[in-house]
Image: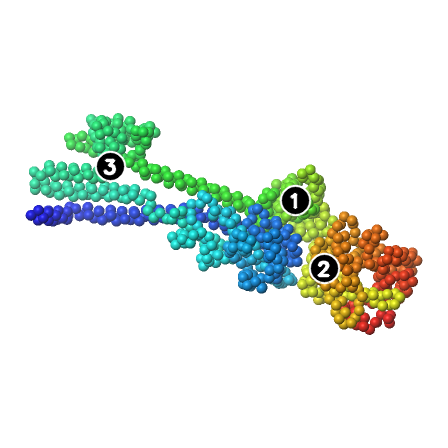
Amino acid sequence: MFSAISSTFGKSTIIRFLKPNYLPTYVALVIVAAAGLFAEQQNRAVHAAKARAAVTAELGPIRSRLEANINGDIQLVRGLIATISTEPGMNQKRFSDLAGNILDERSRLRSIAGAPDFVVSLIYPMKGNEKALGLNYRKNDDQRAAAMRVRDTGKMVLAGPLDLVQGGKGLIGRFPVLVSQDSQAKHFWGIVSAVIDVERLYQDSGLLSPTLGIDVAISGRDGLGEEGALFYGNSAVRGTNPVDVHVFLPGGSWVISATPKGGWVETPPNAWLIRSLVLLGGLFILVPMFITGQLMEERQRNIRVLEHNKDQLLELSHRLKIALDASQIGIWELDISSGKLLWDERMKELYGLRKDAREVYEDWRDALHPDDLQQAEKEFSDALLHGASYATQFRIRLPGNRTRHIRTVGSKYTGAGGKEKIVGVNWDVTADVENSERLEAARGQAEAHSAELEAARHSMEFNALHDPLTALPNRRYLDEILAERRSSTATQGLASIFHIDLDRFKEINDTLGHAAGDEILRHAAQILRANTSDNDFVGRIGGDEFVIISRNGGVEGHDAALAQRIIDAMSVPVKYKEQDCRIGVSIGIAHQANRAEELTQVLVNADIALYEAKRRGRNRHEVFTHSLKTAVFKTKQTADEILRGLEQNEFVAYFQPQFCPASLNMIGVEALARWDHPTKGLLAPYAFLKTAEDINVLAEIDQRILEQALFQLRRWEASGIDIPKVSVNLSYHRLHDEKLIDRLNQLTIPKGKLSFELLESISFDDSDMTVLSNIEQIKNLGIDIEIDDFGTGYASITSLLKLTPRRLKIDRQLVIPILTSAKQRQLVASIIDIGISLGIDVIAEGVETMEHARILKELGCHGLQGYAFARPMSANDLANFARERRWLAA
């Protein structure tokens, strides 16, 4: 029976709530549910977007620093490569000097190696990398492919990070080096490899920061981007929907993936707040609508059954109480005429009052926060006065010095009996306010961080365009001015460019250290600033090179006066650690002929003038002229042709025989350098010797002549031709070469058959230990020493006793006049007597006629060399000459 009753009641309830009165409520319920689901989804999406934005914001500086650090290090190496391109014959010392300048504490470079023709012969630092010397990439299976790719693509190849043999990990950048072969083409010189310390790169880029709030994984080994392998971090990061950013590198890229520490939090912290608000809002909508449906139903029921009115009202009141309790909203009502205030229990809980507390207006006013009291009372008075809707927010004070944020909504109405009342609701919004404050604080921090990044950007731009040591504009700044023509010189008058180079700076840097060199550079910068106007451009463009661009180029005498002031100021000694450092300055000046002339060309002209100033003795200034340009270009053309000639093996040895005056037997030959020029024919040393010395290849020419002479000596001996001795010139620069003996030890030199001719113009000073040591070791190798051009230089009896040469060669200037000058003949006789007395053989050069030969024979000369017997000839011609003994006919 009870079951039947329950079933009947359930059916009647369902039928009741399916009446049209409740249809709007159900529609609203569906809408509220949909809105709640949408709000939940949007809240999760916003939370996820903020989390990813926070990760992106923290990841952005890391990516920027990685790109800046790697590109900065690579640019340092490219600067070295640019120098190698102009000095393909660079030796280890020169390479170490250049590489040492860039492997400073501000770069992450660990080592740099140069491999001409794929064989490592240059390396810095040498310590710890000795095993790499001599490495041939063509024969190394592990590195051949990468090296060939550098050559074939002509681009830098970035490998790594890799485990290094010497410990740690490193990025290896391999760079192609191209040098000019002629004016139209370049040829492949080799590769330069640079190792970047990965751990230091990570440290400098912020990846190892203990405050880092994200987990990071980096992939793209060897610059392969998304296709490359993971080389940093946990691979699990890649599988948790990370934030990915690309790090663009020369020749490739990396992919950085990041997630927050501990992973993504899918549920927003305010999820329940949003749900509560949605529920509260839904109740605000559904409850009134539901009540409205109830009231409509009640009204219809009251019409039918008036006696049930009281019971239905009680039921409705009970339901409303439950709804209000669930929503935690406090309800208040004020009778305006009597001042009676009604609060429900929730209102008293919100204000921290006891349930039996009085209900008067003063309770509400006294609970208000002092800072909000005046505004809250004004808004409430306005609502009472104008009858408008009442909505505001204020703070109240609670016991225990706590503060609570209250939001209230109310409205004025006329009740029974015409009494005016105002009713409203209060609810606690403290959590909302605190969340808003946190969001505002986060926004402020983000704005502050953005300001810091902007300041950092400005600082980076300044540092990129200025020299950190002198604070002067650098070469990049100068290039922008020259390229864009925005400087004052282009718009306010003709410009003059001063190209300035410090003299003796390298000596100070080498002897007193880089700190002294830095002090000299700062001192030079101060002098340049002090002697130029505010409108002039003053910049440091290289190690000890500066540039001034003055817009007073049209003022007569201005440039020369400015240059002289700078020279005079630079001549004053600089005090460094109680030592006087003396430097000079060479200045090249070029004027802008007209406004249309490019400043880049003016700078080239100033460089030409600087070259001339240094050539004429330094510590002076020279002004560019077109004739000077022609001379410099001609010298440069000769220098380029000499370098090309060395590459093409155009420098060959010619041989001039030497004869015994008594027996007329050949007692030796002198190997002479000749340039077999492809268009100018066979050139004697006077045509190229000075330029070769200027470009520092004279020692290379000497070495090649020596090697050819030794080769021909073995060839003649194999052919049965006896050449007792070959004399080869040894230049001043080779004699000062600390590695001369090592290079000689690598050659096969027959003892007693080779002699080195030293010019008498070389000063054999006791203090020059390198020269004296090299001469002594040359003798120990079985090589004789000869003094060439005796009588025209510094040699003295003391020098002869010290050096104990095997031969003296009397200069042809002294020999030729002996046919007509008795004094000259007596001078030559004295030299021969000195040689005989010291046990030194004497050879006479410049024997032009047989009469010369006869006189020299009578004077006791030991050997004759000159056109009277034979001119210098090729190795093949000398072989035929010796077989046929043609000199006997002469």
Q: Label 3: which residue?
A: 329
For label 2, the crowd category at 10 Å Cα-Cα, with few meaning under 14, some 14 to 19 and many 20 or more, is some
| Number of the label disc, if any, that sits on residue 744 | 2
Residue type, label 1: Gly
Quarter holding residue 193: bottom right
**Is residue 370 at all visible to an observer of this figure?**
yes
Residue type highlighted by circle 2: Leu
Q: Which numbered marker is on residue 513?
A: 1
Tell me: residue 315, above or below residue 76. above
Of badges 2 and 1, nearer the viewer stands: 2
Q: Residue at x 63, y 49 (%)?
A: 542
Q: Position of residue 559 (x, y in %)?
A: 68, 45
| Residue drawn at x 48%, y 56% as measured from the top left | 221
Cα separation, mark 3 vs mark 1, equals 81 Å
SS for callout 2: helix
Q: Residue furthest right?
A: 822
SS label for mark 1: loop
Q: Are marks 2 and 1 in contact (CB under 8 Å)?
A: no
**x, y percentage for residue 817?**
89, 59
Task: Decide which of tag 2 and tag 1 comes sooner along the chain.
Answer: 1
The span from disc 2 to disc 1 (Cα, nearest Å) is: 33 Å
